[in-house]
Image (tube, helix red, strand yellow):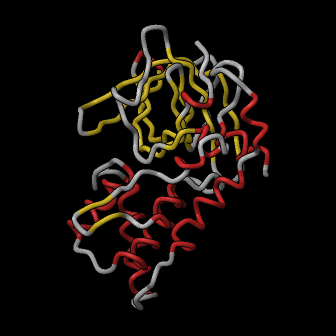
Amino acid sequence: MHSEPADRYLCSKLVSIQLPAAGGAERVIDGNLEEISPCGAYLNVEEPIHTQLSMRFSCSDNQGQHEFAGVVTGSSRDPDTGYYIEMQFHPGTTWSPAAFHPNHMIRASAVLGLAPAEAAPPAVGCDRGVCPKEVLSELLEPQTPLSGRVRAAARKVASLCGAMSDKEAAGCFSTLFGAGPECRLFAEFKESYTQGRKRDSRPHHRTLRTQFKGMMQLANAIAPEVVRSKGCAESRSTFTSIRLSGK
């Protein structure tokens, strides 16, 4: 099964990855879903996962729990951002936006310039209103490891969204990353948010230019020639290609 760029989506979603361990048990690690298509996915993790290894990852949204099983077909390391895992889904495992909609999905074709009108993430919001685009751009920053993205997003929230209670901060984290306060990264989010509030309590006035600056940097960072590669088995992830090429 092949996936054209129009079928691939960049995204940001915390997931639990189940790996085989000694004695037939399973070992669980955290990861971030970076890209998904009908036949496979790309994930960012903090430790190596060998090719040809069978694995599963699971996550939840407002429709319930979702699980995807497959085999690792590629594994690369970036010294700054960790390991990028290419996963091919097993026969019988597939994905569609209607079945599972990860956080902040953007069509790969939009970021590659084939559908510019879709280049910005759809509006994300909470009781306070629509989430600033500067915050969303931090979630999809291709040159930053996951923990760095969590901290950067928290600092933007501190600057642009004002004071929050602990409950509101937990809700904000859940909206942005699709995980609850029990996630180990929430502590980093909350600490960076608190530090950001202490450093800068001045009001910020956002212009249209600053709102889209992050997304334009992301779009400009991606090489157009990536669009010529086709298929889950034939091509690397759009994000992975850029991260590892150093462009």
Q: Quadrant of the N terminus?
A: top right
Measured along the vertical axis of the image, is residue 170 above or below residue 110? below
Residue 129 image position (x, y, % from top left): 28, 67
Q: In the picture provided, is 107 more to the left or to the right than 176?
A: right
The spot of residue 49 in percent (x, y) is 59, 30
Question: 101 and 61: which one is in front?
Answer: 101
**Which residue is at a point 40% across and 88% down the rendered structure image?**
203
| Quarter-of-image position of residue 51 | top right
Total marks shown come to: 0
Taking the image as shown, residue 128 lies to the left or right of residue 192, namely left
Q: Viewer-proximal residue, 190 or 1?
A: 1
- Extreme-bottom residue of the structure: 202
User: Residue 215's spot in the image, x, y percent?
Assistant: 58, 59
Residue at 36%, 59% (x, y): give it. 186
Residue 71: image x %, image y %?
Answer: 55, 17
Residue situated in front as seen by the camera: 52 or 110: 110
Q: Is residue 206 above or below residue 225?
A: below
- Residue found at the very far top of the displayed protein: 91
For image coordinates 66% across by 38% down, the residue present is 238
User: In the rendered image, which quarter is residue 209 located in?
Assistant: bottom right
Q: Is residue 232 above or below residue 42?
A: above
- Name the residue: 32% across, 28% down: 66
Judge by depth and name the residue closer to the eye, 3 or 191.
3
Q: Is residue 196 left or right of residue 60?
A: right
